[in-house]
Image (cartoon, rainbow, N blue to C red):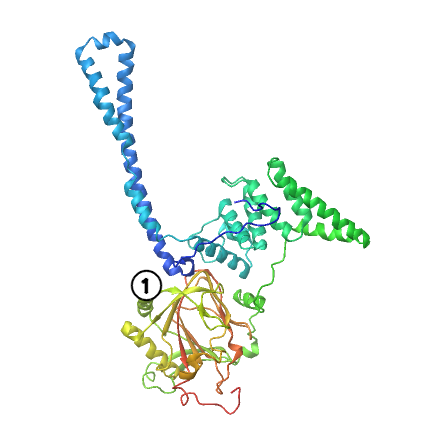
Amino acid sequence: MKPWLQLMFFPCVFLIWHAEAEFFTSIGQMTDLIYAEKDLVQSLQEYIRAEEKKLSQIKSWAEKMDVLTSKSASDPEGYLAHPVNAYKLVKRLNTDWLELENLVLQDTTNGFIANLTIQRQFFPTEEDETGAAKALMRLQDTYKLDPETLSRGNLPGTKYRSSLTVGDCFGMGKTAYNDGDYYHTVLWMEQALKQHDEGEDTTVSKVEILDYLSYAVFQFGDLHRAMELTRRLISLDSTHERAGSNLRYFEKLLEKEREEKEKENSVNKTVTSTEAVVQSGAYERPLDYLPERDIYEALCRGEGVKMTPRRQKRLFCRYHDGNRNPHLLIAPFKEEDEWDSPHIVRYYDVMSDEEIEKIKQLAKPRLARATVRDPKTGVLTVASYRVSKSSWLEEDDDPVVAKVNQRMQQITGLTVKTAELLQVANYGMGGQYEPHFDFSRRPFDSTLKSEGNRLATFLNYMSDVEAGGATVFPDFGAAIWPKKGTAVFWYNLFRSGEGDYRTRHAACPVLVGCKWVSNKWFHERGNEFLRPCGRTEVD
């Protein structure tokens, strides 16, 4: 791919094929790819063994014929004087060499190619590779990881360490470039160049890397560095189709800039500030659509949590019997306050390991890309700010589903008759759900009339997460970390039925690990007397 075509600074447009697979959105389903790849390796090894056997036979024949022809060629007439030798020569050339030809032409690839063809239909797509690359960039931004850290695989809690090659870093940069993301293009092309300069063996040339890097740097208005990189490119390939014209274009722009600044009598100041950018080579991450981005990502890193000593004193642990629910009197649940206002609690030992595995087993075949409702149209659609797969389980699917539903009803004191089905979600690479409300803010929502709004959220953590994956509340600065077998609960609505906008929350990107959760949304209908109205709008 060439980054500049026709006109000097017009990037190419690439088509991305969309597929239903979307492996990158679910680590749970990506495990199937491990077994598929293992099967392919076994098939490849069988092919290699067949080839080695064939080559061994050919080598044995060649060695035997080398000895024989050395003897016969030294005295052809004397050799052929023996009638048996004459017969065997004719036979070899008429029959034996033909058999050897058939052996050489024998195709041992059939089994491997057939298996590969079958497996290929289940392979990740271009969309998966792009999604996976963007996931790494999302982790890079959220957890403030430099490309070197990611490239070397220096992540906390990792059991199997892996690193990125020059080609991998170059691929990351190309993905960002194709998306018009020049910030990450610069970061990853610089990393590719750094590893290339260190002598790493690769098929990617420095010319290719510099081609992308110089253009991305130019997009930030850093003419000095763009010129520096372009000159380096020309020193490596003086015949490069665009580099010479690009360099002249840069020089013309720089000269024009200097002339304009001279008129304003500030040329010295301009040159100094521009050169400072060149020396640092650092560019600011562009702002995006999320107003609380910085707060949200800081909480994901465990920074900015507003847990003051005064607030800490208001948080307690207790045994919870569901307001003297007969089922919980003998075996109450351990309840811990996570936050005081709005009140968020965590329950321990809500689901056993056996129940969790059964729920995952039921959900995995049904996992589909999680959707969000378009706030303007109300239509369900996939979105980059929600990277996970989910499925919905009914009580008829298995007794364990009914058992878990009943337990949530006993703990909360709310009815599950009007609640939504049990939703099970598995987060993919850098899996996340950016800040959102659980309750509906759309008056046209059809379910509001029949079932009411989402009154409360009961969130089960079905796995531990080695790093990342917290549930955070940017409005009041809370961060809740996943613990397998526990659950957190909060009300989305005040007693008046008005939405509690403080409950806007997010699922942070999973840095290391595989995150499974399940949740139950309780609705207003049927709970009017179980959670009666308060005296004020914000009770």
Residue 341, given in percent of the width and then of the height, sits at: 52, 80
Q: Say which of 279 and 481 sits in front.
A: 279
* Residue at image location 57% in from the left, 40% down from the top: 207
The residue type indicated by label 1 comes to Pro
Q: Is residue 303 visible?
A: no
**Total tally of numbered discs in the picture:** 1
Residue 122, given in percent of the width and then of the height, sits at: 35, 53
Q: Which quadrant of the figure has residue 286?
A: bottom right
Relative to 532, does residue 28 appear above or below in the rendering? above
Relative to 383, does residue 128 appear above or below in the rendering? above
Q: Determine crowd level at label 1: few under 14, some 14-19, many 20+ residues with C-alpha closer than 10 A.
A: few
User: What is the residue that sits farthest to the front in this orientation?
Assistant: 6
User: What is the residue that sits farthest to the bottom in this orientation?
Assistant: 535
Residue 30, given in percent of the width and then of the height, sits at: 38, 57
Q: Say which of 99 and 280 sits in front.
A: 99
Q: Say which of 413 and 464 sits in front.
A: 413
Relative to 526, does residue 57 appear above or below in the rendering? above
Residue at which label 1 appears: 365
Q: Is residue 145 visible?
A: yes
Residue 162, given in percent of the width and then of the height, sits at: 45, 50
- Left or right, 69 with reference to 341: left
* Residue at image location 55% in from the left, 78% down from the top: 311
Q: Secondary structure at mark 1?
A: helix
